[in-house]
Amino acid sequence: MDTNSREGSPVMIVMDIALRDPVHAVSLQQFVYEKLKAQQELLGDEGFRSLMETVDTEIVKQLQEFLQVF
C-alpha cells in the first residue's frame, strides 16, 4: 500500500465528512444574526423589542458586541 496515497482511507473519509459539517462551514456570527433577524421579522419590531427586554442585560451587551459587524 502506498503511504502517500491516503485518499479513500477511513481516516480521510471521516475527516472529509467532519469538514463538511456545518459547524466548520457556517459563521457563528452570521448564524446568530440570521436567527435573531428571523425572530424580529416573525414578531415584528415591537414584539421583538419586548422579547429582548426579558433577556439579561449582560447577555444583550455581549450579543451586541459579538454582532457589531452586522
Image (cartoon, rainbow, N blue to C red):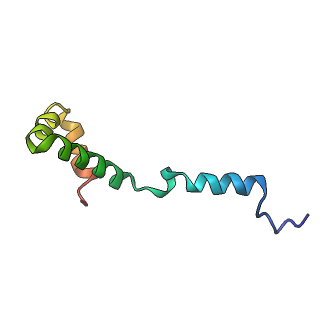
Return the x and y of residue 43 as percentages of the image width and height: 16, 40
Q: Residue at x 11, y 35 (%)?
A: 50
Q: Quadrant of residue 52?
A: top left
Q: Is residue 31 left or right of residue 26?
A: left
Quadrant, the C terminus:
bottom left
| Residue under the image location 25 percent in, 61 percent down | 69
Q: Is residue 48 above or below residue 23?
A: above
How many labels sit on residues? 0
Q: Considering depth in this image, is 12 or 35 the residue closer to the camera?
A: 35
Quadrant for the N terminus in the image: bottom right
- Residue 16 relative to residue 68: left or right: right
Foreground residue among 59 and 30: 30
Left or right: 64 in relation to 45? right
Identify the residue shown where x is 20% and y is 41%. 60
Where does residue 17 sit, x and y in percent of width and height? 63, 53
Residue 30 location in percent, x, y? Answer: 33, 55
Q: Residue furthest left?
A: 46
